[in-house]
Amino acid sequence: MSNIDFSHPREAARAFTPALSAFVDNTLYPDIWSDPALTPRDRSLITVAALIAGGHKDELPAHLRRAVGNGLTQEELSAVITHLAFYVGFPAAITASAIAQATLAASQESGLKDKQ
């Protein structure tokens, strides 16, 4: 499965499950993510925690980038991963930490190149 590009998980799934992608496009993001009961930052925090707890490492990078875009800091994400270690297990937390390091370091490098 390592040859699948999960930088945009929705796009990776679109060709095989267009109805699922349409549901995400037409319901999840416009209705659920836009519900004012939770901020986008809170939703990102919940989503990242759920992905880590569920072992969904392929989708984690895209949601880590979204979390930073929605206002979570790297320090907060680090604290979330550390906290989760005690509830979902150290292997899940260590994997998430390695993914976060690689993802956010790559995002920072990309941002620095964009500014030059």
Image (cartoon, rainbow, N blue to C red):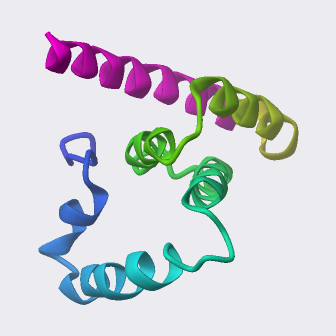
Is residue 100 within the magenta segment?
yes
Q: Residue at x 66, y 37 (%)?
A: 92
Residue 7: quarter of image: top left
Q: In the figure, 56 relative to 97: above or below?
A: below
Q: Main secondary structure of the magenta part?
A: helix
Magenta region, residue range: 91-116
The x and y percentages for residue 49 are 66, 50
Is residue 12 within the magenta segment?
no
Quadrant showing the C terminus: top left
Residue sitting nearer the eye, 73 or 86: 73
Q: In the figure, 78 relative to 84: above or below?
A: above
The x and y percentages for residue 63 are 45, 49
Residue at the limit of the structure toward the top, as seen here: 116
Residue sitting nearer the eye, 11 or 112: 112
Q: In the figure, 40 relative to 112: above or below?
A: below
Q: Left or right of 72: which side holds 61?
A: left
Residue 48 seen in render: yes
Q: Residue at x 60, y 61 (%)?
A: 43
Residue sitting nearer the eye, 60 or 3: 60
Residue 20: quarter of image: bottom left
The x and y percentages for residue 39 are 61, 63
Residue 91 seen in render: no
Q: Left or right of 61: which side holds 44?
A: right
